[in-house]
Each structure stands twice: as structure tokens, then as C-alpha cells.
Amino acid sequence: MALIRWDPFREMSALQERMNRLFSDVRAQAPVRGEEIVQGAWIPAVDIFETNEAIVLKAELPGITAQDISVEVKDNTLTLKGEKKFEKEVKEENYHRVERSYGSFQRAFTLPGTIHQEKVKAKFKDGILEIILPKVEEAKPKQVKVEIS
């Protein structure tokens, strides 16, 4: 029977590898990657999709008024800024639990060069901000008719 010398650092190394794997899995499941985020107390969720005419971004902004939102397009970057203010209807000492997020936020998205920046439109209704980023004419898909000879 061979004796194997016990090495406590081998077990610590294995534990460290497992912890690194755990944290890398959590980072991989993060909802937002590859875009500039300046975090405040919260970050609004967004959906981004594309049509033949435009790229559309929809952001959930519950409890915010249109006056508390700023949308800026500059140098191929779309920046959303705003603030969700804490309701002061009830005295703070009367609260039992506060789970909703409050505070300022800022998100920035890099736009493709195919966006007509001067024609960007934003609509706000029922807590949803919809930003329509129209494509320039040459970026729109064109139908080519195939002739049969």
C-alpha cells in the first residue's frame, strides 16, 4: 500500500476552482453584457428589435413621468437617463418593507451606422418608452425581381 501525503493546499485549490466557476456562471447569466452601463439604484429592462424600416427599443419605466426621462442620440450612441423618485406619501418610519427600486439610471447603446440619427422618435405611454430609430434609405432591404428566361 502506497502512502499519499496529504496536501491541504490541493483541497484549497479545488475549492477556489469551484468558486471561480460559480462566479463565472453568475456573470454569464447577467442580463446585460457588451454595452456601457452606468449603474444607479436600478436599471430599466429593454427589448430591442428590428423591422425593415427601423430598429425599435422599448424600455420599461414604471412609476416615471415623461419629464423625468432624457433620450439623447449623439455620435452613434443612444443614451437613456432618468430618475424614479421615492413616493413621500407615507412617512418613512411607517414602512415595513421597501422592495421597489428608486433613484437615477443611465444606459447607453451603440448604434449601427445605418441609423438616420436626425429622425429618431420617442413615445412614452403606460410606463413604456418606445424609441424608433429609422434606417437610412440605402440600409433598407430591397426586393429584386428575378426574371425567368
Image (spheres, grey):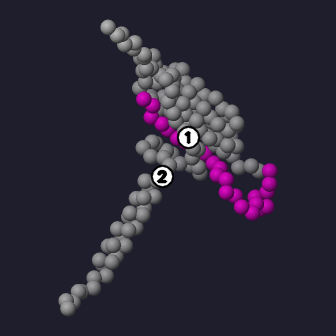
**Badge 2 local density, few (<14 within 10 Å), some, or many (20+)?**
few
Residue 14 is situated, as x and y percent measured from the top left of the image, at 33, 72
Q: Is residue 17 magenta?
A: no
- Foreground of the two, 36 or 144: 144
Label 2 sits on residue: 30
Question: The N terminus is located in which quarter?
Answer: bottom left
Q: Kindly identify the residue that appears in the image at 32 percent across and 8 percent down.
A: 149
* Mark nearer the N terminus (2 vs 1): 2
For the residues labelled 2 and 1, say whether their Cβ atoms are less than 8 Å apart. Answer: no
The x, y position of residue 82, in whole percent, is 61, 40
- Classify 10 Å Cα crowding around label 1: few (below 14), some (14-19), many (20 and above): some
**92 relative to 19, above or below:** above
- Would residue 24 be found to the left or right of residue 10 on screen? right
Where does residue 70 sit, x and y in percent of width and height?
60, 34
Which region is colored magenta? 89-112
Tag 1: residue type? Val
Q: Which label belongs to residue 139?
A: none
> In percent of the image, x 38 and y 68: which residue is there?
18
On screen, residue 39 above or below 18: above
Q: Secondary structure at mark 2?
A: loop
Res. 112 image quadrant: top left
Residue 79 appears anywhere in the view: no
Label 1: which secondary element:
strand
Residue 99 pos. (x, y %): 67, 57
Q: Amino acid at mark 2?
A: Ala
Check the image and report above or below for 122 versus 29: above
Nearer to me, 43 or 28: 28
